[in-house]
Amino acid sequence: MPEKKKTTKAKPKGKDKKWINKAIKNPGAFTAKAKKKGITTAQLQANVEREPDKYDEKTQKQAKLRETLVRINRDKKNKKAKEE
């Protein structure tokens, strides 16, 4: 019997479209941190960006991810508004 060749699925060129799902490990963790401090997520993000040394690396990454997701959402809304 001839050997079967292993075929590998070629990754599509360009960016991985599901990177957001991989980036969000603990949904709601950043929001919980903000609520615990009695502030909004936007305020916590601003605080982290202003004084990153006061926060651990995980919180810094969460703030950066929030910034990216907000920008993506804003861009989507602007694009949709232009189409209408």
Image: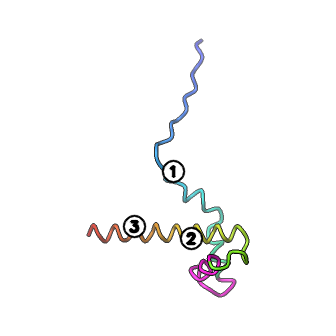
Answer with left or right where residue 80 lies relative to residue 51: left
Residue 76 tag number: 3
Outermost residue toward the bottom? 38
Answer whether labels 3 and 2 touch (C-beta < 8 Å): no
Residue 82, by quadrant, is bottom left
Distance (Cα) linking label 3 and label 2: 15 Å
Task: Report the residue at 62% width, 86% height from top.
Answer: 39
Look at label 1 and name its amino acid: Asp
Query: Could you say which quadrant of the image residue 27 lies in?
Result: bottom right
Numbered disc 3: secondary structure: helix
Place of residue 66 in the rendered image (x, y in percent of width and height, measured from the top left): 56, 70
At x 56%, y 80%, the residue is 42
Q: Secondary structure under badge 1?
A: loop
The picture places residue 56, in percent across and down from the top left corner, at 73, 71
Q: Quadrant of the C terminus?
A: bottom left
**Please, what is the three-letter code of the amino acid marked with disc 2?**
Arg
Q: Distance between the Cα atoms at labels 3 and 1? A: 18 Å
Circle 2/circle 1 CB separation < 8 Å: no
Q: Are marks 3 and 1 in contact (CB under 8 Å)?
A: no
Packing grade of label 2 (10 A; few <14, some 14-19, many >=20) is: some
Report, in whole angstroms, how far the alpha carbon at label 2 lies from the one at label 1. 18 Å
Q: Amino acid at mark 3?
A: Lys
Left or right for 79, reference 42: left
Extreme residue toward the top, this view: 1
Which numbered circle lies on residue 16?
1
Residues in magenta, as a range:
35-49
Instruction: Work out whether 32 lies above or below 57.
Output: below
Q: Residue at x 63, y 81 (%)?
A: 47
Q: Residues within 10 Å of mark 1 (few under 14, many from 20)?
A: few
* Residue 50 sits above or below residue 2 on the image: below
If you read the primary sequence from the N terminus, does the residue marked by circle 3 or circle 1 appear first? 1
- Nearer to us in this view, 16 or 6: 16
